[in-house]
Image (spheres, rainbow, N blue to C red):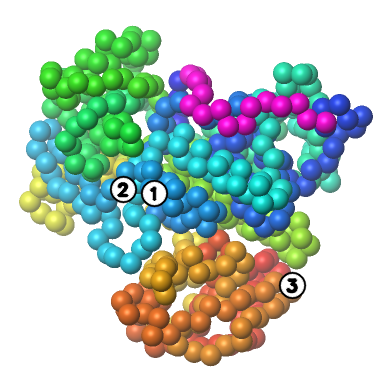
Amino acid sequence: MNMEPRYRLAFQLYPYEKVPAQDAGAPIRHPIVIVGAGPIGVATALDLGQRGQPVLVLDDHEGIGEGSRAICFSQRCLEIADRLGCGEAMVEKGVVWNLGKVFHGPQKVFEFNLLPEEGHKNPAFINLQQPYFERFLVDQVRAEQAKGTPIEIRGRNRVTAIEDKGSHVLLSIETPDGPYQIEADWLIACDGARSPLRDMLGLGFDGRVFEDNFLIADVKMTADFPTERWFWFEPPFKDAGQSALLHKQPDDIWRIDFQLGWDIDRERELKEENVRARVDAMLGPDARYELEWTSIYTFQCRRMERFRHGRVMFAGDAAHQVSPFGARGANSGMQDAENLAWKLDLVIGGVAPENLLDSYSEERVYGADENILNSTRATDFITPKSEMSTIFRNAVLTLAHDHAFARPLVNSGRLSVPCTYDGLSLTGDDALPGAPTRSRPGAPSPDTPYGNGFLLNALGADFTLLTVNTDAPESVTEAGVTATRLALTTADDPTGLIADRYLGQASVAVYLIRPDQHVVARWPDFDEPAIRRALRHAIGLE
């Protein structure tokens, strides 16, 4: 998503400080350098740092820019943040919502519940302005630094050149005190949709550009609207365009999106009196509010061909872009971070071969394609490109008002769900008859109540051998990797949700779960040779 180039700091969290490396006679070598201190860069640094890997993060600013930008953070994203140590703070600050309503003109078509079931620590979604989301991640970095975790963030360190030296990369950096150079064994590019690093390496970024513009207005007001997602097709408000969206955020901030079309005068549309005219038409002439932030964005659905290029990995918007419909940008990027960190840790530690990093590209390209497909479908439904497409869209909306069968066809931005790596190279055996589809190999482990807390919090940062109603050793070690057992029984499952989400029709189960909480494989009982093979398979040795 391409935002207007306004960058005023909301939080100055890593102000520039000169470091000794700037006066060193030769470039200092770092094991891992991350370029970009946005949410994906900082989340990746946190994950690697908590695994004991020294990480240097470079950013061309000194903190977090203003404006809501990404606001919808999904359950899986919050589960990742929870594992990193800052998810609870995000949920506490955020606006929790599960209910959405879809309108066509003035008429409500239907409503939907994103989390109709119980037994999850985290809600389906929260609304939280991106500056807060980023700040909580950086706050966790500061807490980790106080414990000695090897993470460093350098603000106003802009990378100006990169050279691939085979065994490492050489970075040229510009600062307020002049240029200097550093070396990196591994470089992770999290420098956004316009990614200077991608351009420096001459890498492509292919896909579809959508000829449309959307106006964001962050409005501060006290209103009695419920905490829900409201989306209008052909909204009844004056000059609202083809669609409109209303979301509540923390601090009495409401996010409003108006679809403006392609051929517009951006400068004119961003004038306060014109923004207010649209907002007044939506909220009514008596509404009292303050404009906190406005922007116009366009978007594209595209990605790099590969996310790994030798010793350089790309993640987040630097690797892939989608439309904002469905909240797939930052949520997908957080899944990039969790996928990459454990693999790079094992490679640096000499446990896994370098080709394990190719599976990062394989899996997250697969995830990007899934997101691009869903995002493109949403965009085409919201903004039909032909008369026949418009007739179809409107017929679906008419049917959906009275008939449940038509509601799944309505696409106002189907919201982000975590990617399941079906059939990919690290996905192992599914040898558990009658087991639930949702916990199949390749899927992220579903949360359930467990003890006084929740299951995902009980999974370690490494491989886990999850057993249900069966005996097994306390751990299994193969090729330098240890899977530690987490033993569950029906006594641990008063709600029946463990059985529902992990057993299905089976009475006994054994799961091998990756450090990023995705299932590797599952069996009807403990099978040591099979588990050892699956461990080797999961780290790229088979």
- 10 Å crowding of disc 1: few (<14), some (14-19), many (20+): many
Identity of the residue drawn at 61% across and 76% down: 484
- Does residue 409 appear in this view? no
Q: Secondary structure at mark 2?
A: strand
Q: Amino acid at mark 3?
A: Gly
**Residue 261 horizontal/vertical position (percent):** 30, 22
Query: What residue sits right under mark 3 in the picture?
Result: 480
Query: What residue sits right under mark 2 in the picture?
Result: 96
Identity of the residue drawn at 42% across and 27% down: 67
Q: Which residues are magenta?
A: 5-20
Q: Is residue 71 above or below residue 91?
A: above
Q: Nearer the viewer, mark 3 or mark 1?
A: 1
Q: Amino acid at mark 1?
A: Val
Q: Earlier in the sequence, mark 3 or mark 1?
A: 1
- 10 Å crowding of disc 3: few (<14), some (14-19), many (20+): few
Q: Is residue 55 above or below residue 511?
A: above
Q: Which mark is residue 91?
A: 1
**Residue 270 horizontal/vertical position (percent):** 35, 14
**Residue 96 horizontal/vertical position (percent):** 31, 48
Q: Is residue 210 above or below residue 473?
A: above
Q: Is 362 on the left-hand or right-hand side of 218?
A: right
Q: Secondary structure at mark 1?
A: helix
Identity of the residue drawn at 43% across and 85% down: 489
Dominant secondary structure (helix, strand or loop) of the stretch shown in magenta? loop
